[in-house]
Structures are given as C-alpha cells and as structure tokens.
Amino acid sequence: MTPLSLAPMKLGYGYDPNVVTLSSLLNGYCHCNRISEAVALVDQMVEMGYQPNTITFNTLIHGLFLNDKVSEAVALVDRMVAKGCQPDLFTYGVVVNGLCKRGEIDLALDLIKKMDKLKFEADVVIYSTVMMVFANTNTSMMHSSSSLKWRRKGLEGMLLLTTPSLAAFAVMEDGGMRLTTQRDD
C-alpha cells in the first residue's frame, strides 16, 4: 500500500485512519527501508488534516537514521518544532543514538549541550549511549580534555539520575573508565 492510497481506503472501506494507525504504517515503511514512502506519508497526513505527534516524528527520525539519512533526521527535529510539536527526551535520545552509531560524536555532544540549554536533562540511556562510543573510540579521543570532562559529567549524571544499569557499568568497565571524583585537569 502506498501513502497515496489512504484516501480511497478511508472512503471506500469506511475505515477512518487516525494518527496512531498512520504512525504504525509509518513505522512499517521505515523498517522495510521504504523511507521515501514514509516521508510522503507524513506529508499526506498533514494534507488530510492530521497533526503528526511526537511519536510520529520520533518514528520518522529513527527511520531516517536506519536509512543513513543523518542530516535529514537532525533537520527533522527543527521541522518538528516549526510544526508546533515539541521534541521530548525520547526524541533527543533517538538522535543521540543515531549520531553515535554513525560516529558523529561531536554532533551528539553538541546536541546534549543544546538539550542542557533547553532544560532537558540527559537520562541514563543517553549517557550510556555516549559512554559506549567513548569506550569504543581510539585512545587519543578518549583522553582529550573535553572528552574527559564529558565522561566525568556523564558518569556523575548517570549516578545522580538513576541507578545505572548493569549495561552502563559494563560500558564503563570495558572502556577502562573508573568512577572517581578526582580532577584530571
């Protein structure tokens, strides 16, 4: 089914899709590598009078990352805001995860700084994602002063926000990170 066949489905079958069903269809397109149809579906949703919600945008952002459309995924966060839909912590987590998986650690750290300015505190999932990148990164990057400051902030943030998961401790151990309050400056 293509996005363009939604109008006849609505009229011909008596089925009135809503944002939830359309977002589910969007998820299917994204996971089947049919990203152009996913984008077209969101555009059609708007044309049909539906207001995409945060879940809709998060699904499309994730789909864009799955299809290596990094710049489009990052730009969609700004488009979200322009459409009156505020990103949530999950949105930022999807973007940080997508950036980290593609080795874009500087962009991920910039986004976390932006989150701080917007009064969004990174959670244990976001910290763990970035910590995993540091654990798997070459040693010159891991020992740079900005990296050390961020790793310290990330560790402290994880401990203050919630009890870190076993996975988070495994990341820290595998990456040679130790929990200390000692300054390395």
Image: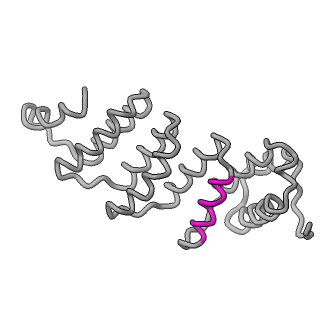
32 vs 162, left or right, is: left
Q: Residue at x 39, y 62 (%)?
A: 81
Q: Can you say whether 133 is above or below 54 in the image?
A: above
Check residue 72 for magenta coloring.
no
Q: Determine the residue positioned at 82% across, 50% down.
A: 141
138 vs 54, nearest the viewer? 138
Q: Looking at the image, which residue is at 7% across and 36% down?
A: 11
Q: How is the image coloured?
A: one colour
- Please name the predominant secondary structure of the magenta segment in the image: helix
Q: Is residue 27 above or below residue 152?
A: above
Quarter assignment of residue 28: top left
Residue placed farthest to the front in the image?
71
Considering depth in this image, is 172 or 34 the residue closer to the camera?
34
Q: Is residue 124 left or right of residue 11?
A: right
Image location of residue 84, percent across then percent down: 33, 64
In which quadrant will I find the C terminus? bottom right
Q: Residue at x 78, y 49 (%)?
A: 134
Left or right placement of residue 178 versus residue 119 in this view: right
Magenta span: 106-116
Q: Position of residue 94 (x, y in %)?
A: 54, 49
In the rendered image, the quadrant that contains the N terminus is top left
The stretch drawn in magenta includes residue 114: yes
- Tally of numbered tags: 0
Percent of width and height locating residue 104? 65, 47
Image coordinates for residue 169, horizontal then vertical, percent? 79, 51
Q: Quadrant of residue 43?
A: top left
